[in-house]
Amino acid sequence: QQPVQSPQAVILREGEDAVINCSSSKALYSVHWYRQKHGEAPVFLMILLKGGEQKGHEKISASFNEKKQQSSLYLTASQLSYSGTYFCGTETLNTGNQFYFGTGTSLTVIP
Amino acid sequence: NAGVTQTPKFQVLKTGQSMTLQCAQDMNHEYMSWYRQDPGMGLRLIHYSVGAGITDQGEVPNGYNVSRSTTEDFPLRLLSAAPSQTSVYFCASSYVRPRESPLHFGNGTRLTVT
């Protein structure tokens, strides 16, 4: 039930862009994205509902292709504060109310 | 608003001991859930609740019990602690079911079982 994320880790220089992918083998209601700093709780970034929408949050945006059960998180002109582990979370159509997270993508932004 | 409050922040148990991790939210959220986080394995769902009096199992429920007698509280009980339960535990809640609503997390409980 757990979605698959790629890549597992990425290192960027300030100002560079990154894409994090999340895919599921099951049909999805929605996809969430969270960021977790070391030693802290995950923090909600955005939710994408069925309909293929794209959303933005500062220089971070995401898309959701419900036909392919895939979502991508786009980080543009990365800043040092973007460092952390990014998780996607999903609820599939056949697991009623069970919300699963991917294994995470570690993002490190260096000066 | 305090949001989601978890206690304790740290706990050390001996194998076989029992304890309860507390979780309370003051946002009138219907949905509450418990996750454990282990290195390299992300967040795994233990139990969840869609409202007072209703609970159900997630993907790793063995060794844990929950109850939801009020909307605000969702305690997690470890029945007989084992070293494999050493982990960081997060409680999370959402206004309605997470297919439509973001999850709000507590600050976590770091549990060590020796």
Image (cartoon, grey):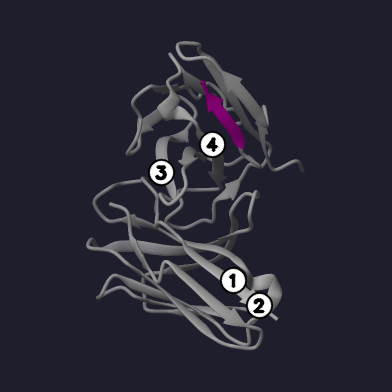
Task: Judge the density around disc 3: few (<14), some (14-19), many (≥20) Cα neighbours within 10 Å.
Answer: many
Which type of secondary structure does the marked residue at label 1 adopt?
strand
The residue carrying mark 2 is A110
Circles 1 and 4, Cβ within 8 Å, touching? The answer is no
Secondary structure at numbered mark 2 = strand
Q: Name the residue located 56 percent from the left edge and 19 percent from the top edge.
A: B20
Q: Is residue B71 visible?
A: no
Gap in Å between the C-alphas at discs 1 and 3? 24 Å
The C terminus of chain A: image quadrant: bottom right
Report in which chain the residue with disc 3 lies.
B
Graded by Cα atoms within 10 Å as few (under 14), some (14 to 19) or many (20 or more), the crowding at tag 2 reads some
Q: Which residue is mark 1?
A: A108
Q: Are marks 2 and 1 in contact (CB under 8 Å)?
A: yes
Name which quarter of the figure residue A26 lies in: bottom left
Q: Which mark is residue B89?
A: 4
B106 lies above or below B103:
above
Q: Amino acid at mark 3?
A: Arg
